[in-house]
Image (spheres, helix red, strand yellow):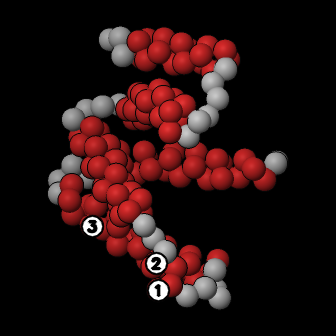
Amino acid sequence: MNSQYLPIVLVVLSSLCYHIFQKSTPATLNPIATLIVTYVCASVVSITSFFIFVPKANLIESLRAANWASLLLGFAVVGLELGFLLSYRMGWNISTAGLLSNTLVALLLIPIGLLLYKENFSFTGISGVLLCITGLILITQR
């Protein structure tokens, strides 16, 4: 396998586990309490990973390099976690919640990529967007 796909494999496997674990969270557990447990665990894993994968780096110096994006990412991740948890508690199916939200995000990222990051968009991309929109319509039909 080409090594450029390894990060995507990590994203896919992590996302798969993410949705399974979100759907498996007990309905009796306070949503904020589950986020606290999740982020304490994530902090331990992150700190441990830092010292394993970057053993000669200084953690404090590395943290000083963080900017506004890292801070706002924290808010975005909490919103993501809470949104999916509440969606599943409201009865969304695991097979459609992720698909619907990820497709909508992909569609919203197209103009952002074009305008902010000067990315290119091809006829094939436009065809893919039309398929995504068709898929959204089909998947939301009851």
Viewer-proximal residue among 56 and 48? 56
Query: Which quadrant is home to the C terminus?
Result: top left
Q: Residue under circle 3?
A: 36
Choose the circle earlier in sequence order: 3 or 1: 3
Residue 37 figure quarter: bottom left
Which residue is pictured at 61% across the width and 34% down the height? Answer: 119
The mark lying in front, picked from 2 and 3, is: 2
In this rendering, is residue 14 above or below 89? below
Q: Residue under circle 2?
A: 63
The kind of secondary structure element at disc 3 is helix
In this rendering, is residue 140 above or below 33? above
Choose the circle earlier in sequence order: 2 or 3: 3
- Pointers 2 and 1 in contact (C-beta within 8 Å): yes
Q: Amino acid at mark 3?
A: Ile
Q: State how far apart marks 3 and 1 are (Cα).
A: 23 Å
* Coordinates of residue 132 in the picture (x, y in percent): 51, 19
Which residue is pictured at 65% across the width and 88% down the height? Answer: 56
In the rendering, which numbered label is found on residue 60? 1
* Coordinates of residue 38 in the picture (x, y in percent): 35, 64
Is residue 133 visible in the rendered structure shown here? Answer: yes
Is residue 99 visible in the rendered structure shown here? Answer: no
Q: State how far apart marks 2 and 3 are (Cα).
A: 21 Å
The kind of secondary structure element at disc 1 is helix
Q: Amino acid at mark 2?
A: Leu
The mark lying in front, picked from 3 and 1, is: 1
- Pointers 2 and 3 in contact (C-beta within 8 Å): no
Viewer-proximal residue among 10 and 22? 10
